[in-house]
Image (cartoon, coloured by chain):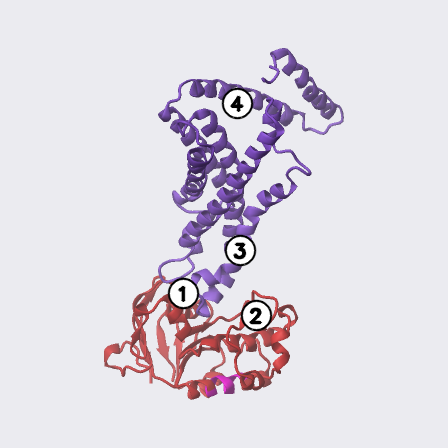
Amino acid sequence: MAKSNADASRIAMNGLIVDQLRFMHRGPYSFGIPSSSVFGLSGSSGSGKTLMLRAMSDLDPYTGRISLNGIDCQSLSGPEWRQKVAWLPAESLWWHETVGAHFWKRPSLEWFNELGFGEEVTQWEISRLSTGEKQRLAILRLLQHHPAALLLDEPTASLDKNNIAVVEKFILKYLSDCQGLAVWVSHDSGQLDRVAACHYAMQLDGSLRQLR
Amino acid sequence: MNVIPLGAFELSLASLLVLLLAWLSFRTRLEIEKPLLIAALRTTVQLSLIGVVLNTVFASVNFWLVMLVWVVMLTAAGYEVMARQKVRVKGPGRFFIGASSMLVSSFSIMVLILALVIKVEPWYSPRYAIPILGMLLGNTMNGIALAMNTFSSLAWNRRAMIEQRLALGQTAIAAVEDIWRESVRTGLIPIINSMAAAGLVSLPGMMTGQILAGNTATDAVRYQILIMFMISSGTGFGVILSLWLMRRRMFDGRSRLRMRDSFHVS
């Protein structure tokens, strides 16, 4: 599905297209991710997976081109782009006292329920959340702007087995509902087999190798 | 009505009190006698020198001479603000953000007050212009230094959090809105407190000086109120301007946080 070093302009307009992406002495990376699909990515820590996600959400300077459904990153402001191409960091940070204060658009109750929360979760204090609860809430927080592309940095690393299945199902349902796409970083190749259409590994030298 | 002049003998009588304190410190091993004596000596020398300088400046109402004094005062204040930052902007901005904010706020307020409120002729009369800028700068300097230090330190410590807010699609302004508010408050609280306590707890120095010099208390009070308004507005506008300039350095044109590129811990 994804073509490494392919001529990006020949890939269909829909989806996320990364063309000659370079950042922090890394790259160039060229690949395309079609709509409604997941790009699996693994690789040992320090190989630069997180840096690539940061560059793709325009949080770090880069050269080359990134476009989503035909819209070039540079034609939008940084915040507008990040609302469409949303990065989920491996560890979520929280800055207000309560869960609800982090939501400017209240997600549907259905979403909360699907991830195992009741309506009262918005009143909860951040200091009382467990790591796993924080991670599931961080996913809901990320989806407020209904991003069309998710850059998921080990989204289930802090979850127990049951919740891993819940979160996988939830994210895949979200992507199919809105024809969204995702880069899914994981150390668990079993998980990438379940969720991703293809699986690339980032080598220590920074290059991408297709495993599947 | 004139203030009773003080001679060298009267001053040395007062200095005996300082010497007595130094002796007490020495005997009880407080180890504060050395800094105390050095500071007392510095205050004597520095103030005597500035007395001579001011006498010269007052005697000739020369715009350029007044200007020179202003520039020296402003530069000193700029360095002081810079020295009080733990996390500093890289490059010349580390001096110019504070200095230009004080220039714009203190200086323009001073000109406004001299020309339109007190209506001195000419507006740069050194007898008014130098002490007023001195009082303004002394206070805005404190406020700006506090606010800038709070803002850059908090942004540095919370940079990961600011990036996560950006990652959620927040604008640069929204991503630092809480530390912005906290920094402005930190810069303004001292002057707000001293306005609230004035007359009840403290008689501000300028008013005390005028009363000692034989002015009526009513006149002294009016000047003091004027000065308080100038200081609080000058501090407020200066603080906001300096933080605005600093925030521009924190983010690039794509609203990316550039803390590591533009700031360093001194």
How far apart are labels 4 and 3 at the CA level?
Answer: 38 Å
Query: Outermost residue, right direction?
Result: B28
How far apart are labels 1 and 2 at the CA level?
Answer: 24 Å
The amino acid pointed to by label 4 is Gln
Sooner in the amino-acid sequence: mark 4 or mark 3? 4
How far apart are labels 2 and 4 at the CA level?
Answer: 54 Å
Q: What hue represents chain A?
A: red
A207 and B96: which is toward the camera: B96
A121 and A20: which is toward the camera: A121
Question: With B245 as the anchor, is A69 left or right in this view?
Answer: left
Range of magenta residues: A167-173
Residue labelled with disc 3: B181
B159 and B78: which is toward the camera: B78
The subunit letter for the residue under badge 4 reads B
Residue labelled with disc 1: A59
Residue labelled with disc 2: A101
Could you say whether the residue bearing mark 2 is in a helix, strand or loop? helix
Residue labelled with disc 4: B46
How far apart are labels 1 and 4 at the CA level?
Answer: 51 Å
Instruction: State the quadrant of the C terminus of chain A.
Output: bottom left
* Image position, residue B246 (x, y; %): 44, 50
Q: Residues within 10 Å of mark 4 (few under 14, many from 20)?
A: few
Could you say whether the residue bearing mark 3 is in a helix, strand or loop? helix
